[in-house]
Amino acid sequence: FCNCLKMRKKTDGTRARKKMPRKKKVSIVTFGCRLNQADEALLYGRLAAAGYEAAAPGEKRDLLIVNTCTVTASASQKSRQALRRLRRENPNAKIAVTGCDPEVNGLFWRNEPACDIVIPGSMKNRIIEFIEGENPSAKIAAGQVFSEHAEAQFPFKTRALLKIQEGCDCFCAYCIVPFARGRPRSRESREIISECRRLLQSGHKEIVLTGVNICRYEDGGKRLPNLVREILGIDGKFRLRLSSTELDPQLDEILHLMKDNPKLCRFLHVPLQHGSDEILEKMRRRHSTADFANFAEKATAAIPGIHLGTDLICGLPGESEDIFEKSLDFVSALPLANIHIFRYSPRQGTDAAKFAGRPRQCDVRRRMKILEKTEKKLSRSFISSQIGKEASFVSEKIEKDACAGGWSDNYIRTSVRSQNRADEPIRIRFLRMRGDSSIEAEAT
């Protein structure tokens, strides 16, 4: 009788419906680079296929994942602090940790009481097996073309980051990345193109190609320029942006593509790491200051308005005051739009951790402040140089003043006089600066 009663018609004439079970909610907290953010999207895709749903802000979470970074000691510490905070705030949730830090500091994480599951960064594609209590052990072989077999998801986001490459074998003296990410390997090109089409059909207006060093991409003789050209050939109005890549001869061909196709954003981030050849040699970098300066001149001459960014490390052992001043003079003369500045952080297992002559921390802090002032000056100079110029713009939100907020193709934070978010990239004209780091524009 009770079973029949559950299915009887209600007095309003409708049939009682069986209550569907609640989907499990998941949130991922990601630290570090754009590649880590692309990995986050793939994790969301794998979890969605297993019945999880991204939790909106304020929703109760059944599963929490900390996607860690280990490039500096500060990054590792932030990841660990976040995990312990999440445990305090969510005592009943299952908490997993993955990313680069467990790859190089696995013993620490296996003994961390706030963590339920430890997933090495090289095995995050097996996350469902870990969550279900299995213990997979297979890893991707070095040099192998790989497939992700997952559909990346970007909940509550406009821009899509597409992973095309993994790993590095440069073994720069200061860098832990080869130990955390493994040797270079590339994602299957057919899967990349298929993923691009799906992301565009899902409404994303900009795709960012990410990897440890995307100029190391290769699949059956197809290299980065070939892949970029194929993506640009996909029908539709969208933008394609390249993430950070090392200085490489292929970038000359990328500049030609950028010049000929407005879909390809006028943006390159090419790590320099130091402005003196003495330190570059100690770092085992594969370029000189002259190499970098020549490319910067070539890029800015070929692509008017290009946003050229770089990375700098301050305080490597051997950086004397004279060498720092030499580096500062070199960097200050470059046509840079931004600089990511890092304080040198010794990473166990790297050669630089054994170097003598580490500068005093008070000197490093002072030098960091000088570099930060230089970065602001270069950034402001670049932004002001664009006033009166035109650009491509993708809107991401409506701001408090009813302007559409987003980024130009040459990566300037922009507010456009419009109360509507455009469904595709539009042309704008820069009008005036707003503070030190953004600009106001109008649609053309």
Image: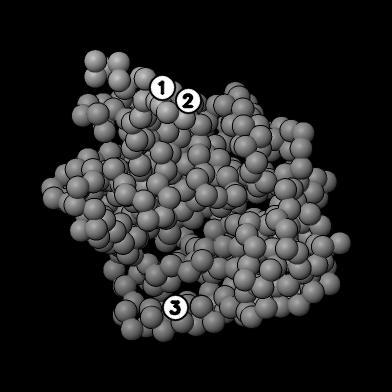
Secondary structure found at label 3: helix
Quarter assignment of residue 406: bottom right
Label 3 with label 1: CB-CB less than 8 Å: no
- Where's residue 206, x and y in %? 65, 47
Q: Counting residues from the N terminus, which is met first, the one under dot 3 or under dot 2?
A: 2
Give above or below for 259 relative to 227: below
- State the residue position of label 3: 368
Label 3 with label 2: CB-CB less than 8 Å: no
Q: Counting residues from the N terminus, which is met first, the one under dot 3 or under dot 1?
A: 1
Count all numbered tags in the image, as a single digit: 3
3 vs 1, front mark: 1
**Camera sees residue 200:** yes
Give above or below for 376 relative to 70: below
Identify which residue is drawn at 34% across, 77% down.
359
Q: In which quarter of the image is the C terminus?
A: bottom right
Residue 1, labelled with which disc?
none
**Camera sees residue 189:** no
Quarter assignment of residue 437: bottom right
In the image, what residue type sits under mark 1? Lys
In the image, what residue type sits under mark 3? Met
- State the residue position of label 2: 13
Mark 3 burial class by Cα count in 10 Å: few <14, some 14-19, many 20+: some
Secondary structure found at label 2: loop
Label 2 with label 1: CB-CB less than 8 Å: yes
Secondary structure found at label 1: loop
Give the side of residue 48 with respect to residue 406, left or right: left
In the image, what residue type sits under mark 2? Gly
- State the residue position of label 1: 9
Mark 1 burial class by Cα count in 10 Å: few <14, some 14-19, many 20+: few
Distance in Å between CA atoms under marks 3 and 1: 72 Å
Distance in Å between CA atoms under marks 3 and 2: 72 Å
- Where's residue 349, x and y in %? 27, 51
